[in-house]
Amino acid sequence: MKKVLIFAAMLILVTTVACTQKSETAVSTDSDGTVSTTHVESTTTPAIDTAATAEAASDVAEAGRDVADAARDAAHATGTALEKAGQKIQEKTTTSETKTDTTTTKP
């Protein structure tokens, strides 16, 4: 689980740093006094590193398997604890001695 969180944080950091937007405005005046402006916006996108992407995907898959294993272990431990608790309850409860109330009261 910790690996997944670290991977997500790194992905967000790389995305915000690598994808930058550049904006340029050029103002020029010709000999007649006409002012013209040119506005250019460009976005840079990072190149995708397929080896790093494959490694990250492998890490995420491994983390998922680790989480599944931990959940299975927790379920097993819970089942074992419930079984032991049930056995202790059965030890303390006697079912062979049952008492019935046969007294009647007059109205």
Image: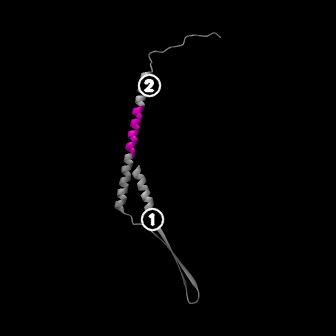
The residue that disc 1 covers is: 17
For image coordinates 41% across by 52% down, the residue present is 4
Helix, strand or loop status at disc 2: helix
Q: Is residue 68 magenta?
A: yes
Question: Looking at the picture, does residue 73 appear above or below residue 107?
Answer: below
Helix, strand or loop status at disc 1: helix
Mark carried by residue 80: none
For image coordinates 45% across by 59% down, the residue present is 12
The type of residue carrying mark 2 is Ile
* Figure quadrant of residue 88: top left
The type of residue carrying mark 1 is Val
Mark carried by residue 89: 2
Image coordinates of residue 24 in percent, x first then y, are 51, 75
Question: Looking at the picture, does residue 95 appear above or below residue 27?
Answer: above
For image coordinates 39% across by 46% down, the residue present is 67
Question: Looking at the picture, does residue 97 appear above or below residue 5?
Answer: above
Q: In this view, does 42 lie to the left or right of 61?
A: right
- Residue numbers of the magenta segment: 67-81
How is this picture coloured?
A: one colour
Characterize the local packing of mark 1: few (<14), some (14-19) or many (20 or more) Cα atoms within 10 angstroms: few
Main SS class of the magenta portion in the image: helix
Characterize the local packing of mark 2: few (<14), some (14-19) or many (20 or more) Cα atoms within 10 angstroms: few
Question: Looking at the picture, does residue 76 appear above or below residue 3?
Answer: above
Distance from the alpha carbon under mark 2 to that under mark 1: 60 Å
